[in-house]
Amino acid sequence: MTLEQLESIAKRQILAVQEYYLFCLQSVTNLFRAPHYVADILTQADLIGVGSLPIVVLTGFFTGGVLALQSAASLAQFGAQAYTGRFVSLSMIRELAPVLTGLMVSGRNASGMASELGSMVVTEQIDAMRALGTDPMKKLVTPRMLSTVLMLFLLTIVADTVGTAGGAFVAVFISGQNGTQYFTSAYQALVWADIAQGLTKPLFFGFIIATVGCYFGMKTTGGTQGVGRATTEAVVVSSVLIIFSDFLLSRAMLWLLPPV
């Protein structure tokens, strides 16, 4: 690969980052401009939140169960099985529930947004909206962004609850622990900093999922093949950004709200 080719690739990537930044900025500023498409927001909330609920419940339950199973086996070597609830609740609420819920919603909805908007682009429906005086960003992107942020926040709370319950199921019925002791340990281990960290991350993850999915959808070119390519890129990029931002957010939250 020649130097000119590397320079061309670098320029394209920098341009894409700039376009994505402006895309995000416009989607946020649209929140403060009329009209507000409340019906579209509610429709997207139903599709994103209610539609993703079964996979989030299953993922949370079995993740909590696996955590309890593995931690109980490890803690038993030190006679500390009583701390199983503490381990499960801290792991789920601070880290696993937000990240896994974000990845599940990303795989389901970022691809859906990219394919839906990409299909509208290649069939010239977006151009028709502009011709009729409707702002596609405000009509299509902003409702999806707002709905994803709100619903991912609520879905993370569901994952926290179901994951803790899944851990309790395994701890009581498989490991033979005391249920009251499990929930007492899980409750006493939590402090405000843990809950704040676990419920702050979904706000950023939801924004990433919606803006990345809509960005690749709105930038689709090349007909039906371009729609497939945009769908794949949306899922890959949003998943990578979720993992990357999780590290940055964890570091920032530990600095702002250190555990006591």
Image: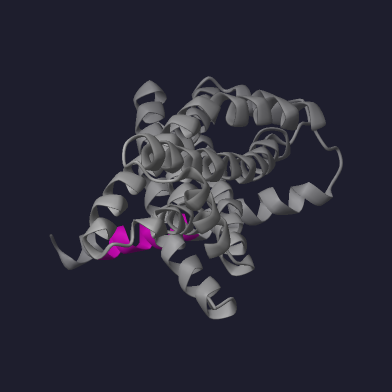
Along the horizontal axis of the image, is 89 left or right of 235? right
Residue placed most toward the observer, 9 or 181 = 181
Q: Quadrant of residue 64?
A: top left
Image quarter (top left, top right, bottom left or bottom right) of the C terminus: bottom right
Does residue 219 appear in the picture of this structure? Answer: no
Q: Main secondary structure of the magenta part?
A: helix
The x and y percentages for residue 196 are 62, 63
Residue 11 among magenta residues: yes
Residue placed most toward the observer, 55 or 173 = 173
Q: Looking at the image, what colour scheme do you see? A: one colour
The x and y percentages for residue 200 are 60, 59
Along the horizontal axis of the image, is 78 left or right of 161? left
Q: Quadrant of residue 158?
A: top right
Residue 10 among magenta residues: yes
Q: Does residue 138 lie above or below 15 as drawn?
A: above
The x and y percentages for residue 65 are 37, 40
Q: How many marks?
A: 0
Does residue 40 appear in the picture of this structure? Answer: yes
User: Which range is magenta?
Assistant: 7-17
Residue displayed at 44% across by 36% down: 61
Residue displayed at 53% across by 80% down: 255
Q: Does residue 249 lie above or below 224 as drawn?
A: below
Q: Does residue 213 lie above or below 98 as drawn?
A: above
Q: Which residue in the rendered view is the most extreme toward the right? A: 34
Residue placed most toward the observer, 130 or 215 = 215
The x and y percentages for residue 28 are 70, 52
Residue displayed at 74% across by 28% down: 42
